[in-house]
Amino acid sequence: MEKGFLDKVEDNAAVRTWSETTQHEKGDSLAEGYVSKLWDFTRISVTQNSLQELKEIWDQWNDEVRQLFYSYHGDLPYLLDMKVDKHLFQALARFLNPTNSCFTFEKVDLLPTVEEYMALLRCSKIQVDRAYSRTINVPTFLKKLMNITEISEQWVTAQIKQKRISKCIPWKNLKDLILAHLDTKKKVDIFTLSIYSLVVFPKDLGHVDEAVTDLSLSACRKAGEGRFIECAQFLLTWFYSNF
């Protein structure tokens, strides 16, 4: 991460300009003088996975491995350096408009979208066709993990756990694979899988959920019913880019 994240926010300018222009053309969605009272009873929780182990792995990699990561998966590692500020989230809650599922600042309504996140973090694997349509013959969680890790079916089967209504694999097991895998590309893919689950879509602390095995933001959006409501780092990325 040679450049700081804030040096790259201009990449989101086109998306932001389009959003604001469209709103001004269509008209504001809120009545004059509207003030949200949501912050009076909102309770903010910033409980998250520990990212220290992911940071330590990233810091151990040389420039060649990091460039390999960037070329396939964009700037996702920037999320590891995002400091989650509980007080900032409490302040943001004052501007949340639950009726229209957006934030309202003065007379401007803003809503973080997957397209903005894609622009900010250069995540090129958007898989648009998979975001809105049902894929035929979707591989099982087992098959996806075998493809990503290139580890035997017997080993992968032994690691899969059932958590409530979904399947997952403990982060500890994937960490061991990252450190020991001889294939650099597979090492990078497993690390990416871990970021998607521990940061972007953290359903169960310390576990990697089957919802993220497509390694795409669109797949996470579909699993999260269209929004990244679980990812504090993404919301802060969007907030900093706009303000």
Image: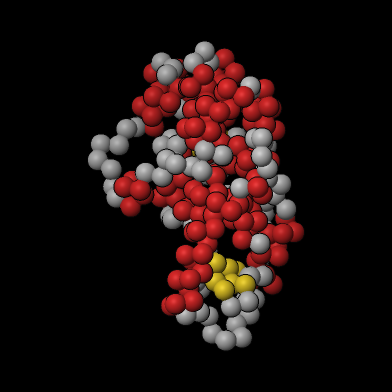
Q: Is residue 91 visible?
A: yes
Give the image location of residue 16, x and y in percent.
Answer: 52, 62
Give the image location of residue 160, x and y in percent.
Answer: 46, 28
Asked if residue 184 lies left or right of residue 58, the reply is left
Which color scheme did the rendering employ for the protein? Answer: secondary structure
Q: Is residue 230 visible?
A: no
**In which quadrant of the rendered image does the N terminus lie?**
top right
**In which quadrant of the rendered image does the C terminus lie?**
bottom right
* Extreme residue in the top direction: 182
* Extreme residue in the right direction: 87
x 60%, y 37%: residue? 77
Asked if residue 85 lies left or right of residue 132, the reply is right
Looking at the picture, tell me which residue is in the foreground, 67 or 82: 67
Q: Compared to 190, does 153 lie above or below?
A: above
x 30%, y 37%: residue? 138
Looking at the picture, tell me which residue is in the foreground, 111 or 230: 111
Q: Compared to 179, does 35 lie above or below?
A: below
x 65%, y 66%: residue? 93
Q: Total marks drawn?
A: 0
x 70%, y 33%: residue? 52
Give the image location of residue 229, x and y in percent.
Answer: 54, 55
Asked if residue 226 lies left or right of residue 111, the reply is left
Give the image location of residue 181, x and y in percent.
Answer: 53, 15
